[in-house]
Image (spheres, helix red, strand yellow):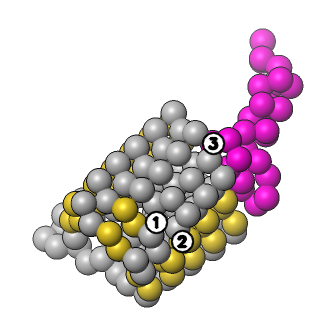
Amino acid sequence: MTLNNEKIERITDCTIDRKDGNIEFAEMKNSRFCAVVSECDFSGSEFGRTNLRGNSFVCSDMRGDYFEEVNLSGAGFERSDIGGAGFTDVNLHGAAFDCCDLSGAEFTDCRIDGMKIKGYDISELIEFYKNNHKENG
């Protein structure tokens, strides 16, 4: 599935099928996605320069997804598997992750002020760590 300059309003209980073993089977670029996504399999998908602001992702499989230059401000992730996902230059201001598997997820050059995981503001935790971390050796 490739979406380019599209607007989608609701997706529920879906799976995006891979064709011919192609790992990059779902791609969304330059699109506005305003939806409640529930019980969907987006694993291995790529999201680039896409506005996902305020969306809700519930019980969804997003393992190994790649987000680049995506606006996820105010988005909510609940009971979703996001393990191994990559986030590069993503706006996560005010995003919330609740009961999600973020194992192996990597966040690079992302805006994280106000982002919460299990109710904790991540930017505050990082600042606390920086101020209190003692170098070994």
Q: Is residue 106 visible?
A: no
Quadrant of the drawing holding the C terminus: top right
- Describe the element under mark 2 as helix, strand or loop: strand
Position of 121 relative to 54 (above/below): above
For the residues marked 3 and 2, what is the alpha-carbon distance in whole angstroms? 18 Å
Q: Quadrant of residue 33?
A: bottom left
For the residues marked 2 and 1, what is the alpha-carbon distance in whole angstroms? 9 Å
- Describe the element under mark 3 as helix, strand or loop: loop
**Of the residues tagged 1 and 3, which is closer to the observer?**
3
Kind of residue at badge 3? Ile
User: Pointer 2: what residue?
Assistant: 57
User: Pointer 3: what residue?
Assistant: 112
Q: Is residue 56 left or right of residue 86?
A: right
Q: Residue at x 55, y 63 (%)?
A: 54
Position of 126 relative to 52 (above/below): above
Q: In the image as oriented, which residue stretches furthest toward the top? A: 137
User: Pointer 1: what residue?
Assistant: 62
Q: Residue at x 31, y 59 (%)?
A: 31
Q: Earlier in the sequence, mark 1 or mark 3?
A: 1
Asked whether the residues under the numbered discs 2 and 1 touch, taking CB atoms below 8 Å apart as contact, a structural biologist would say yes
The crowd level at tag 1 (other Cα within 10 Å; few <14, some 14-19, many 20+) is: many
Q: Residue at x 69, y 66 (%)?
A: 98
Range of residues picked out in magenta: 112-137
Q: Earlier in the sequence, mark 3 or mark 2?
A: 2
Q: Is residue 17 left or right of residue 91?
A: left
Kind of residue at badge 2? Phe
Residue 113: say if magenta: yes
Quadrant of the drawing holding the N terminus: bottom left
